[in-house]
Image (spheres, helix red, strand yellow):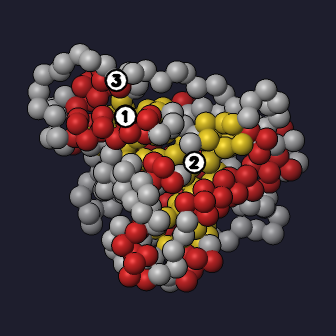
Amino acid sequence: RRHDKMRLATVWGSGTAVGKTLVSAGLMRAAAARSLPSLFLKPVQTGVPDSDGAFVARAAGCQHVVGEHAAAAGLSTSGPSPSAASATPPPQRALTLFAWRPAVSPHVAVEREGRGVSDAELRRATVAEIDRFAAALAASPMADGLPDALALVETAGGVASPSPSRSLQCDALPTALPTAKLAEAPRATETPLPALLVGDAALGGISATVCAAELLRSRGHALHEVVLFEPGGGGGLGNAEAIGAALGVRVRSLPAPPPLPEPLDGWWEEVGAHFAELLDGLPRACTPLPAQPRLAAASSSGAG
């Protein structure tokens, strides 16, 4: 029997450096606080030795595991090793599949370094890791007692950033998973991978976020919620209200983290309850998702 309590999401960004990895780390920390099995999956990473998977693992206190392709770029497994008595895969881990050294778009990294990856390989590896995680959970003797589990996929760059093959990431990554891989649900053939979009709270961010959301929807991705990081958690530019009105989904405003190199300890405490609520709201596998509303035609005030 496959595990049907797993909460799923793909974390997308309206652009680069809007806070996708902070959202992933916050959700993994929320899962760790409840001792929930959880998987963070980073299919594509550039700019090695920088590693979003390693950052998430440090924030959540779990192990970062790298695939063979990522290891060839210089990444290595790090963090606490699971005990011999722990479940397989470990109750919580971060995993990076494919990686390159140049700190550029994936398609340019492939041009410079080689080791290309097709869209089919990317999708197949992503689905296989989630399937492996779900199968291990279902096989665990503790499976029936688990209230929840979490599987996250984090993209690289923005919604329309190129994949290693040059296609758009919104076309390269899966919109759904085969239901048979997740739970006993004979009437359904696929389970949607809900899209959690990290938007832009800056001036101009309304347009960027709405366009990213509509592109996701046009490619078959089910938009679940939008997250914005705003200075002080406020809405001085009105981005959250305008984005929510246009897209018809919840927009969650969180206080922006302190600038680097300031530590994040205090900030994590400040936003912990927000991420716990965000985790609770993620759909479980095989849960029907609401119909996606069409873009609202209403106008809004302010510059976007």
Secondary structure beneath label 1: helix
Viewer-proximal residue among 215 and 57: 215
The quadrant of the image that shows the N terminus is top right
Q: Which residue is mark 1?
A: 214
Mark 2 or mark 1: whose residue is earlier in sequence: 2
Viewer-proximal residue among 91 and 131: 131
Mark 3 or mark 1: whose residue is earlier in sequence: 1
Residue type highlighted by circle 1:
Glu
The residue depicted at 54 percent of the width and 30 percent of the height is 281
Q: Which residue is mark 2?
A: 174
* Residue 183 shown left or right of residue 70 in the figure: right
Q: How far, Cα to Cα, is label 2 from label 1?
A: 17 Å
Classify residue 244 by image quadrant: top left
Q: Which residue is mark 3?
A: 295
Q: Residue 254, which numbered label?
A: none
Residue type highlighted by circle 2:
Pro
- Position of residue 274 relative to residue 73, above or below, is above
Classify residue 185 by image quadrant: top right
The residue depicted at 26 percent of the width and 36 percent of the height is 233
Residue type highlighted by circle 3:
Leu
* Residue 173 shown left or right of residue 202 in the figure: right
The residue depicted at 45 percent of the width and 48 percent of the height is 170
The residue depicted at 53 percent of the width and 52 percent of the height is 173
Residue 46 seen: yes
Secondary structure beneath label 2: loop
Residue 145 seen: no
Q: How far, Cα to Cα, is label 3 from label 2?
A: 23 Å
Mark 3 or mark 2: whose residue is earlier in sequence: 2
